[in-house]
Amino acid sequence: MPELHTIRSGNQNLKCGYTTGTCAALAAGGAAYLLLTGSVPEVLSILTPKGWEVAVTPDTCEIQADSAVCSVIKDAGDDPDATDGMAVFASVSYAEEPGITIDGGEGVGRVTRPGLDQPVGAAAINHVPRSMIRDQVEAVCQEAGYSGGLIVIISIPGGEEKAKHTFNPKLGIEGGLSVLGTSGIVEPMSQQALLDTLHLEIRQAAAEGAKNLILTPGNYGQDYLQSVGLDSLGVPVIKCSNFIGDALDMAAAEHFQAVLLVGHIGKLIKVAGGIMNTHSSVADCRMEVLTAYAARHGASPELCQELLQAATTNAGLDLLQDPELRDAVFQDLADATQKHLEYRVKDSYPIGAIVFSNETGELYQTSTAEPLIRAFRGNEP
């Protein structure tokens, strides 16, 4: 049997799992083997795109009417995957036409909006899993000496209900889950899945004709945009989490014409320090940046010490009681934020930022923010 793969996270070794795409390919290979040979395979195995072998025992494998049906239980390892433990089924039947046709059945979603991996109307089985399914079935055909056509239907019972708690409804995938996976392997707490989803949303916005984009790290930003009416400009608003730099790069790759970044000072003050991944495990310069600009404009050593020891940016702002000092610090933060944003995007598009706190609303904005908003208002429906 293949070795158990783990990855290191802090002081733990976490078990890797396998994707729905790997499960679908394994099940398709098992069903094809039963259909073409009449025998139930004892073990299903596949070499994933990552280069790791996965081998499992089929959960079910039987003839049903004119089809062979095989299922594999999804094992996500130590990743909190919503599909962990679900059965992924493949039904394989003979086709009149040559070649292998792949489609989705119960619990597999359908694409209803452009910009996704598959065209509108297709089953939400991404291109890498489709290739894996085809390779597994073709290998069985070759082994069995069969050169005719086959129809492969992938199903995930319970997938329609489970999909309601995923990104699929937002992305325009209706009726079920997506069959995903580029490596075939699920790595616990992988940030790649988050980046893939972010890229998908940005690419989809571009595919639907959007020219401008508003990025915000999270729910605070969305609430603020709604409170000031910036969510109704006809410009898509996309949550980028901590991946600000990656989101800016993705917007450049999709040829957006302008981007406005809107976020809480607890996140965006880090951008003023040149940090483009704002997760606290990556870097944190919040109080150092605030203190540096306060010191530049004459803050006392005692105040600087208090700022450095403040637990949050809100606590730090409460210490900046002098209006002139506060305004000067905000101007420096705005200028530094603009400089680092422009350095990241180069000449790809105009970029600006608005920074707020939950307590007092807008704190500062970069010099380009208001012109961008005026331009966005030209798109207002």
Image (cartoon, rainbow, N blue to C red):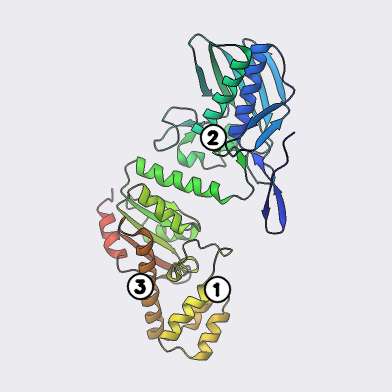
Amino acid type shown at disc 2: Ser
The residue that appears at 50% across and 45% down in the rendered structure is 196
The answer to whether 128 is drawn above or below residue 105 in the figure is below
Q: In the image, residue 101 lies at what x, y percent? A: 50, 19
Q: Is residue 97 left or right of residue 84?
A: left
Mark closer to the chain start, 3 or 1: 1
Give the residue at x 61% y 19%.
91
Residue carrying label 1: 312
Distance CA(mark 3)–CA(mark 2): 43 Å
- How far apart, in angstroms, are the residues tagged by discs 3 and 1? 22 Å
Q: Residue at left 72%, top 52%?
A: 13
Nearest-to-viewer mark from 3 and 1: 3
Residue annotated with mark 2: 178
User: How many badges with numbers are in the image?
Assistant: 3
Q: Quadrant of the N terminus?
A: top right
Marking on residue 341: none
- Percent across and percent down for residue 54 are 67, 34
SS at mark 3 in the image? helix
Q: Earlier in the sequence, mark 3 or mark 2?
A: 2
Label 1 SS: loop
Q: Position of residue 337 (x, y in %)?
A: 39, 69
Q: Amino acid at mark 3?
A: Asp
- In the rendered structure, which amino acid carries the disc numbered 1? Thr
Q: Is residue 377 toward the left or the right of residue 96 in the image? A: left
